[in-house]
Image (cartoon, rainbow, N blue to C red):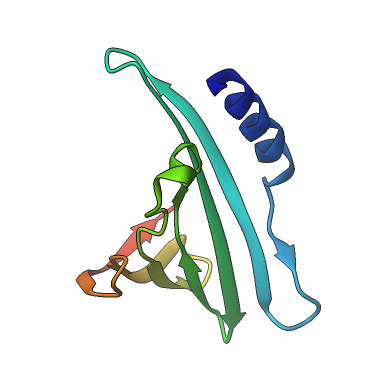
Amino acid sequence: MKTLALATALIVAAGAASAVEIGNTGISIGGTVDANYTTGLDVWAVDLTPRAQYSSWGITFGAETTFDVMGLNDGDIFKGLLLDAAYKIGNTGLTAYGEIGTDADFTFGDAKIGVSFAF
């Protein structure tokens, strides 16, 4: 059964590699599927992470959550949300960002803000 779930996840992951833009609204939806095996612990995991984004005025706002596909029958599959915003600073390679997460009861955790540099 685990092999079937892993094969299914890999097929879905091949089709879920890019986001879909909804017209000219600035809204895009997409997601990722991560199927992995941890040696030593002998643990299989398949996670589905849907994501929605809205971009306007150079700022990208996003929301995502992760579902444990292997534990869908265990009940509590919703673990909370991750909310983020990012702003690319010109052509400098710098991006200012902020993010905050919630748990399943929508209790907010610590906020994180920063600047990243990509080269």
Give whichever of 29, 113 is nearer the camera: 29
Q: Is residue 42 left or right of residue 108?
A: right
Image point (28%, 65%), residue name: 103
> For the N terminus, which image quadrant?
top right
Is residue 3 in view?
Answer: yes
Image point (28%, 72%), residue name: 105
Image point (35%, 58%), residue name: 79
Q: Which quadrant of the structure image shows residue 65?
A: bottom left
Is residue 119 in view?
Answer: no
- Looking at the image, which residue sits at the far left? 110
Give whichever of 104, 100 is nearer the camera: 104
Position of 31 relative to 23 (above/below): above
Q: Which quadrant of the structure image shows residue 76?
A: bottom left
Find residue 88 and report its horizontal and vertical position in percent: 48, 71
Find residue 85 and report its horizontal and vertical position in percent: 43, 74
Find residue 116 and report its horizontal and vertical position in percent: 35, 59
Image point (39%, 66%), residue name: 81
Give whichever of 91, 49 is nearer the camera: 49
Give whichever of 9, 13 is nearer the camera: 9
Find residue 113 and report its horizontal and vertical position in percent: 26, 70
Q: Which quadrant of the structure image shows residue 44?
A: top left
- Looking at the image, which residue sits at the far bottom? 57
Position of 42 relative to 59 (above/below): above
